[in-house]
Amino acid sequence: MVGKRHASEEITAKLAQANELAAKGKTQREISKALGVSVMTYHRWKKMPGSSAPLDGRRCETDDRRSGPSDASTVDTIKRLELENAQLRRLVTDMLLEKLKYEEELRARQGTRLRRPDNG
Protein backbone atom coordinates (compact mmCIF):
# COMPACT_ATOMS: atom_id res chain seq x y z
CA MET A 1 0.00 0.00 0.00
CA VAL A 2 1.48 3.30 -1.07
CA GLY A 3 1.12 6.20 1.33
CA LYS A 4 0.26 9.79 0.56
CA ARG A 5 3.18 12.20 0.20
CA HIS A 6 2.88 15.60 1.82
CA ALA A 7 4.58 18.79 0.64
CA SER A 8 7.02 20.54 2.98
CA GLU A 9 4.70 23.51 3.35
CA GLU A 10 1.81 21.21 4.21
CA ILE A 11 3.90 19.40 6.83
CA THR A 12 4.95 22.72 8.36
CA ALA A 13 1.33 23.91 8.51
CA LYS A 14 0.18 20.63 10.06
CA LEU A 15 2.98 20.74 12.66
CA ALA A 16 1.93 24.28 13.59
CA GLN A 17 -1.64 23.04 13.95
CA ALA A 18 -0.35 20.12 16.05
CA ASN A 19 1.51 22.52 18.36
CA GLU A 20 -1.71 24.47 18.90
CA LEU A 21 -3.61 21.27 19.68
CA ALA A 22 -0.86 20.11 22.03
CA ALA A 23 -1.01 23.45 23.84
CA LYS A 24 -4.73 22.81 24.39
CA GLY A 25 -3.86 19.48 26.03
CA LYS A 26 -4.85 17.10 23.24
CA THR A 27 -3.27 13.64 23.16
CA GLN A 28 -0.97 12.55 20.36
CA ARG A 29 -3.65 10.22 19.03
CA GLU A 30 -6.16 13.07 18.88
CA ILE A 31 -3.60 15.34 17.23
CA SER A 32 -2.71 12.79 14.55
CA LYS A 33 -6.38 12.13 13.89
CA ALA A 34 -7.03 15.87 13.49
CA LEU A 35 -4.07 16.12 11.08
CA GLY A 36 -5.28 13.14 9.08
CA VAL A 37 -2.06 11.16 9.51
CA SER A 38 -0.93 8.21 11.59
CA VAL A 39 0.76 8.65 14.95
CA MET A 40 4.01 7.30 13.45
CA THR A 41 3.90 9.87 10.63
CA TYR A 42 3.31 12.62 13.19
CA HIS A 43 6.36 11.44 15.20
CA ARG A 44 8.48 11.19 12.06
CA TRP A 45 7.54 14.75 11.10
CA LYS A 46 8.44 16.02 14.56
CA LYS A 47 11.86 14.37 14.33
CA MET A 48 12.60 15.88 10.92
CA PRO A 49 15.46 18.39 10.92
CA GLY A 50 14.14 21.93 10.72
CA SER A 51 10.78 21.16 12.29
CA SER A 52 9.98 23.67 14.98
CA ALA A 53 7.93 21.19 16.99
CA PRO A 54 9.13 20.53 20.52
CA LEU A 55 10.02 16.89 21.17
CA ASP A 56 6.98 16.14 23.31
CA GLY A 57 4.62 18.45 21.44
CA ARG A 58 4.49 20.99 24.25
CA ARG A 59 6.59 24.05 24.93
CA CYS A 60 8.19 24.10 28.32
CA GLU A 61 8.88 27.38 30.12
CA THR A 62 12.47 26.34 30.73
CA ASP A 63 13.09 25.91 26.98
CA ASP A 64 13.39 29.68 26.53
CA ARG A 65 15.67 30.10 29.52
CA ARG A 66 18.27 27.56 28.41
CA SER A 67 21.26 28.79 26.53
CA GLY A 68 24.94 28.19 26.06
CA PRO A 69 26.83 24.95 26.48
CA SER A 70 23.99 23.02 28.12
CA ASP A 71 22.06 23.17 24.83
CA ALA A 72 24.99 21.73 22.90
CA SER A 73 25.55 18.93 25.40
CA THR A 74 21.83 18.15 25.46
CA VAL A 75 21.69 18.03 21.66
CA ASP A 76 24.79 15.82 21.58
CA THR A 77 23.26 13.50 24.17
CA ILE A 78 20.01 13.29 22.24
CA LYS A 79 21.85 12.57 18.98
CA ARG A 80 23.93 9.88 20.67
CA LEU A 81 20.84 8.28 22.20
CA GLU A 82 18.97 8.41 18.89
CA LEU A 83 21.91 6.68 17.18
CA GLU A 84 22.06 4.04 19.90
CA ASN A 85 18.30 3.56 19.68
CA ALA A 86 18.50 3.08 15.91
CA GLN A 87 21.28 0.51 16.33
CA LEU A 88 19.29 -1.39 18.94
CA ARG A 89 16.20 -1.35 16.74
CA ARG A 90 18.23 -2.84 13.88
CA LEU A 91 19.59 -5.54 16.19
CA VAL A 92 16.12 -6.45 17.42
CA THR A 93 14.79 -6.52 13.86
CA ASP A 94 17.62 -8.78 12.74
CA MET A 95 17.01 -11.10 15.68
CA LEU A 96 13.27 -11.27 14.96
CA LEU A 97 13.91 -12.06 11.31
CA GLU A 98 16.34 -14.79 12.30
CA LYS A 99 13.80 -16.18 14.78
CA LEU A 100 11.11 -16.28 12.08
CA LYS A 101 13.50 -18.08 9.74
CA TYR A 102 14.22 -20.72 12.39
CA GLU A 103 10.52 -21.12 13.18
CA GLU A 104 9.70 -21.67 9.50
CA GLU A 105 12.52 -24.18 9.22
CA LEU A 106 11.25 -26.00 12.31
CA ARG A 107 7.70 -26.10 10.92
CA ALA A 108 8.99 -27.49 7.64
CA ARG A 109 10.94 -30.21 9.46
CA GLN A 110 7.99 -31.13 11.66
CA GLY A 111 5.71 -31.17 8.64
CA THR A 112 7.87 -33.76 6.87
CA ARG A 113 7.92 -35.95 9.99
CA LEU A 114 4.17 -35.87 10.42
CA ARG A 115 3.37 -36.81 6.83
CA ARG A 116 2.66 -40.45 6.17
CA PRO A 117 3.87 -41.97 2.95
CA ASP A 118 1.12 -42.83 0.50
CA ASN A 119 0.86 -46.57 -0.04
CA GLY A 120 -1.22 -46.81 -2.89
Image: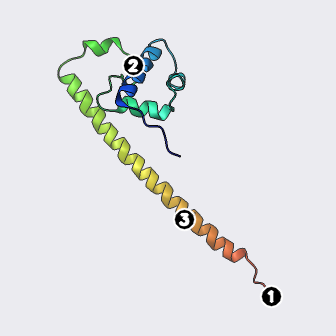
Quick one: label 2 or label 3, which is nearer the N terminus? Answer: 2
Q: Residues within 10 Å of mark 2 (few under 14, many from 20)?
A: some
User: In percent of the image, x 49 and y 14: which residue is there?
Assistant: 25
User: In percent of the image, x 47 and y 37: which residue is there?
Assistant: 4
Q: Return the residue at label 3.
A: 102
Quick one: label 1 or label 3, which is nearer the N terminus? Answer: 3
Q: CA distance from mark 1 to mark 2?
A: 72 Å
**Residue type of the residue flagged with mark 1:** Asn
User: In percent of the image, x 39 and y 19: which residue is there?
Assistant: 16
Q: CA distance from mark 2 to mark 3?
A: 47 Å
Residue 16: numbered disc? 2
Judged by depth in the image, the label closer to the viewer, 2 or 3, is 2
- The kind of secondary structure element at disc 2 is helix
In this orientation, which residue lies closer to the viewer: 59 or 88? 59
Q: CA distance from mark 1 to mark 3?
A: 32 Å
The quarter in which the C terminus is drawn is: bottom right
Q: Indicate left or right for 37 with 63 as reference.
A: right
**Residue type of the residue flagged with mark 3:** Tyr
Residue 93 image point, x, y percent: 45, 52
**Residue type of the residue flagged with mark 2:** Ala
Residue 111 image point, x, y percent: 68, 72
Q: Indicate left or right for 109 with 119 as reference.
A: left
Residue 55: numbered disc? none
Q: Indicate left or right for 70 with 41 as reference.
A: left
- The kind of secondary structure element at disc 1 is loop
Judged by depth in the image, the label closer to the viewer, 1 or 3, is 1
Q: Indicate left or right for 10 with 28 as reference.
A: left
Residue 118 image point, x, y percent: 78, 84
Q: Residues within 10 Å of mark 1 (few under 14, many from 20)?
A: few
Quick one: label 1 or label 2, which is nearer the N terminus? Answer: 2
Taking 7 as reference, is 34 above or below it?
above
Residue 119: numbered disc? 1
